[in-house]
């Protein structure tokens, strides 16, 4: 492999033919298999037929917004990169809700995109290599391989981003994670995301896990610092 990074398949969804060609050549030059698509409809067809680890999606496609495509193809085994223009302010907010993992300015420099994909793959490879399997924290059970969460035997359905956040906290119960650290570990390095995003996702986790908002029993706020998963005892 040219890059020395773990092999991967990349879904590349770009509406502009010339831009898609340039980016495809840059990504393929690293030894990765690139699955190109020019519309949201094509991307959905490709996603139904082939597996991939990373989806790079331009927000402005001929038939729909890229965030609609991201919502359709995302999952616990797929990392998503949304390409946004500076004027796509409202779309960034929508993107946070739909769970895009990374954001980059469009049109993107091919070398910058290659660097970001390398970062994503290295992070995934490191996480998989360091996984210690199923986690148990009190009545909470987390299975990273099956991407399942149970509390007291009851299955808890989480979005991919919510699962990542909970798993990060659960790997070090009792440890206080600053919001900035959670952003880097769960969302990655991204200039478009601010720390208030963590607050929103913690509130969602508490609701789904059955914690009371006025007296959370699992995820505790440490004022002025961040959050921690309460260690039972």
Image (spheres, grey):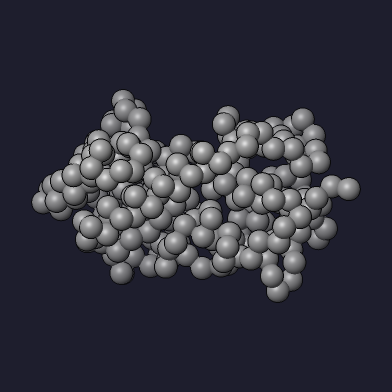
Using residue 145 as the reference point, say whether residue 153 is left or right of it: right
Quadrant assignment for the N terminus: top left
Give the residue drawn at x 69%, y 37%.
135
- Report the number of discs: 0
x, y percentage for residue 233? 88, 48
Using residue 93 as the reference point, say whether residue 27 is left or right of it: left
x, y percentage for residue 108? 24, 60
Using residue 129 as the reference point, say whether residue 157 is left or right of it: right
Where is 208 relative to 93, above or below?
Answer: above
x, y percentage for residue 5? 33, 43
Can the viewer see residue 205? no
Residue at the far top in the pictured view = 49
Residue toward you, 37 or 62: 37
Residue at the far right in the pictured view = 233
Where is 57 relative to 72, above or below?
Answer: below
Give the residue drawn at x 30%, y 63%.
105
x, y percentage for residue 69? 35, 43
Give the residue drawn at x 34%, y 55%.
116
């Amino acid at each position: 492999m040219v890059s020395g990074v773990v092999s991967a398949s990349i879904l590349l969804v770009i509406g502009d033919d010339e831009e898609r060609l340039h980016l495809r050549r840059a990504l393929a030059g690293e030894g990765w298999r690139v699955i190109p698509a020019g519309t949201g409809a094509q991307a959905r067809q490709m996603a139904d037929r082939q597996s991939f680890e990373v989806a790079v999606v331009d927000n402005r496609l001929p038939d729909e917004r890229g965030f609609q495509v991201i919502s359709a193809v995302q999952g616990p085994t797929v990392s998503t990169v949304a390409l946004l223009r500076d004027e796509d302010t409202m779309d960034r907010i929508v993107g946070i809700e739909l769970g895009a993992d990374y954001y980059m300015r469009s049109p993107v420099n091919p070398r910058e995109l290659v660097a970001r994909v390398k970062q994503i793959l290295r992070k995934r490879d490191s996480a998989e290599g360091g996984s210690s399997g199923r986690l148990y924290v009190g009545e909470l059970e987390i299975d990273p391989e099956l991407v399942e969460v149970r509390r007291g035997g009851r299955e808890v359905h989480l979005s991919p981003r919510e699962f990542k956040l909970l798993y990060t906290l659960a790997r070090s119960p009792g440890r206080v994670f600053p919001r900035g650290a959670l952003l880097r570990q769960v969302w990655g390095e991204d200039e478009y995301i601010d720390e208030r995003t963590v607050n929103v996702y913690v509130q969602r986790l508490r609701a789904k896990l059955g914690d009371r908002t006025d007296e959370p029993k699992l995820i505790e706020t440490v004022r002025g610092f961040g959050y921690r998963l309460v260690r039972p005892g």
